[in-house]
Amino acid sequence: MTSILREQICLLAKSMFDRGLTGGSTGNISARTPDGGLLVSPTGTSFGRLDPARLSYFDEKGTLISGDLPTKEMPLHSAFYDTRSTAGAVVHLHACHSVAWSMMPDADVDNFLPPMTPYAIMKLGRVKLLPFFRPGDPAMGEAVRGLAGKRSAVMLANHGPVVAGKDVEAACNAIEELEDTARLAMLMRGIPAQMLDQTQITDLVTHFNIEWDD
């Protein structure tokens, strides 16, 4: 099972890289293994060229067992796993449109994505916009812990989105929805677009049993 998960992580990462969702050696990804361990993309690696055999592997006690050294954003990943019992994977990208939207002066800190489509609400719930932190700063993890597991996704200002999902495919699908919605927001900026109203949002949240932290 672990070998299948290793291949899946690398396949999904390459797909995101090939479509320009994160470039160079940016971004990181992790997933829980069936034995309670963790597979993590190594530091300084490209999503387009991850080697399944060189992924960092931690056992259930958090000890690095094999593979290369992990991403410097491990505190960020650990914070999601420690505070969200449903987290089976975490993805962090340097995605262009979501980063651009994070720099807009009117970006909503508590509900980062405008209610433009039902899918961002269904896959992400409310996205918290966190302030800028130096890359690798453990304070990013502390900021996530401060949310007490109430958010599955955060946006690091001037940096990139981070999403936790039940598995690696769900996490990747959700972070792509985040970026797509931010792209729509940038495209429609300054235009009096028809957003989903509160009644429609409430219906989605209720019908799909969505986490919607107020």
Image (cartoon, grey):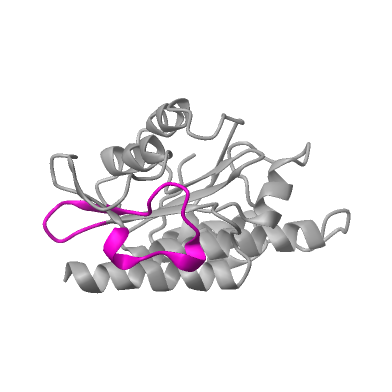
Residue 179 position, x and y percent, is 61, 60
Q: Residue at x 69, y 43 (%)?
A: 102
Q: Where are the magenta residues, as a range?
A: 32-54
Residue 56 position, x and y percent, is 28, 52
| Quadrant in which the N terminus appears | bottom left
| Foreground residue among 72 and 151 | 72
Relative to residue 4, is residue 199 depicted above or below?
A: above
Residue 144 position, x and y percent, is 43, 34
Q: In the figure, is residue 168 to the left or right of 46?
A: left
Q: Is residue 72 visible in the rendered structure shown here?
A: yes
Relative to residue 155, is residue 198 depicted above or below?
A: below
Residue 115 position, x and y percent, is 65, 57
Q: In the figure, is residue 108 to the left or right of 83?
A: right
Does the magenta portion include 36? yes
Q: Residue at x 60, y 30 (%)?
A: 131
Does the magenta portion include 150? no
Q: Residue at x 39, y 68 (%)?
A: 10
Q: Is residue 203 visible in the rendered structure shown here?
A: no
| Foreground residue among 187 and 47 | 47
Q: Residue at x 38, y 51 (%)?
A: 42
